[in-house]
Amino acid sequence: MIIDCHGHYTTAPKALETWRNQQIAGIKDPAVMPKVADLKISDDELRESIETNQLRLMRERGSDLTLFSPRASFMAHHIGDFNVSSTWAAICNELCYRVSQLFPDHFVPVAMLPQSPAWTLPPASPSWRSASRNTATSAST
């Protein structure tokens, strides 16, 4: 089995880019900020975007499976605040998940994490720090 361990959804339907552009415009003018429900992409549109592009190329190249994440150039973590980034990440991740459900033998979804310049990770809980220390100690012995 040949696995592509770093694939991106570069052929997503145009509606995704249109929605993102409206979201970016909504940062300056909240009156035009789109709702998640405003984005409509059918399973047929997803199938077409994959079958005529990425799946076709996988077959031509003899690849069996792709670990499939959102389009890298669309991530744009520097745009907006954490709410903008987390909404965008959720939408992109959902599309990758849907593709994996439509083509389960060919795509495994990989998520993008929401990031924002002004947002930092909250402090780790004591139980997480303990588990991390235990894992690090076990790995070093």
Image (tube, rainbow, N blue to C red):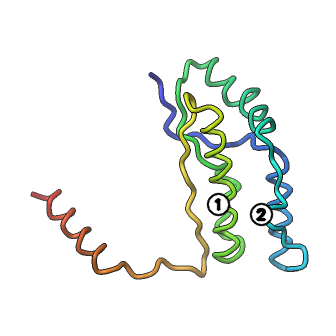
Q: Say what amino acid the circle numbered 1 marks.
A: Ala
The residue tagged 1 is: 90
Q: In the rendered structure, which disc, 2 or 1, sits on the residue that comes first in sequence?
A: 2
- Quadrant holding the C terminus: bottom left
Are the residues flagged by discs 2 and 1 in contact, CB closer than 8 Å? yes
Q: How many marks?
A: 2
Residue at x 66%, y 24% (from the top left corner): 57
Residue 2 is tagged as none
Q: Is 72 placed left or right of 33 in the picture?
A: left
Residue sitting nearer the eye, 63 or 33: 33
Residue 81, x across and y down, in percent: 67, 77
> Element under label 1?
helix
Q: Say what amino acid the circle numbered 2 marks.
A: Val
The residue tagged 2 is: 36
In the image, residue 99 sits, relative to residue 134, either above or below, namely: above
Residue sitting nearer the eye, 97 or 111: 97
Residue found at the far left of this picture: 141
In the image, residue 111 sits, relative to residue 50, either above or below, namely: below
Residue 116, x across and y down, in percent: 61, 74
In the image, residue 1 sits, relative to residue 30, either above or below, namely: above
Residue at x 20%, y 63% (from the top left corner): 136
> Element under label 2?
helix
Residue 51, x across and y down, in percent: 73, 27
Residue 19: image quadrant is: bottom right
